[in-house]
Amino acid sequence: MIGRRWIVAGLSALALTTTAQGQGPQGNEFGFGIILGEPLGVTAKLWTSNANAWQAHLGASYFGSPRIQVDYLWHLNVFKSNIVKLIAGPGVGIGFGHEGNGIWYKNKGNKYWYYREDDSFGLGVRVITGINITPRATPLEIFLELGPNIGIYPGFGVGLDAGVGIRFYP
């Protein structure tokens, strides 16, 4: 029941964002694509201003499969470039179902794995950072992201999320 509340809260926050300003590739505000890594699946991004956006990933993960991840991103122009931006921001993820051993940590004998005993859900937060590349005159966006993921329910654990992906802006 708690999982449904988090999903509704996340979707409500996404719906309440300001109207997008069309700051993605070629002035488009919404893009979709694939992500390889943690999680492995599909991704979507909605720009809310020229420097901010919501991104969501849905896919397979060690944190639970399927996993839903939603992040709020800032795009920082530390490279003084219109093509390459530093991205950073907080996010929340929900993993459903039983997952295998992964990069999450919890004392389990001599090894440290985060896992759930049942098919319930897991809730985690993360702080992501990375690089966002928008090649000139293309409807594409390439991204690399990396950051700690902290499992907070049903138990505490820390892991590392890393992914690379590409989005298309129709």
Image (cartoon, rainbow, N blue to C red):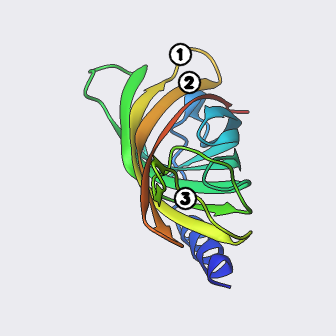
Q: Is residue 60 left or right of residue 137?
A: right
Query: 7 and 110: which one is in front?
Result: 110
- The earlier-in-sequence mark between 3 and 1 is 3
Mark 3: secondary structure: loop
Separation (CA) of disc 3 from disc 1: 24 Å
What is the distance, in whole Å, between disc 3 and disc 2 at their CAs? 23 Å
Q: Quadrant of residue 84?
A: top left
> Mark 3 against mark 2, which lies toward the viewer?
2
The alpha-carbon separation of the residues under discs 1 and 2 comes to 8 Å
Q: Residues within 10 Å of mark 1 (few under 14, many from 20)?
A: some
Residue at horizontal 60 percent and vertical 54 percent from the top: 63
The answer to whether residue 62 is above or below residue 3 is: above
Rendered view: 37 above or below 90: above
Tell me the residue at 58%/69% (across/down): 10
Q: Which residue is mark 2?
A: 142
**In the rendered structure, which amino acid carries the disc numbered 1?**
Pro
At x 57%, y 33%, the residue is 27
Callout 1 secondary element? loop
Asked if disc 1 and disc 2 are in contact, CB closer than 8 Å, the reply is yes
Instruction: Give the percent coordinates (x, y) of residue 143.
Output: 52, 28
In the figure, residue 139 lies in which quadrant?
top right
Residue 133 lies, with reference to residue 163, above or below; the image says: above
Q: Earlier in the sequence, mark 1 or mark 2?
A: 1
Q: Which residue is under mark 1?
A: 135
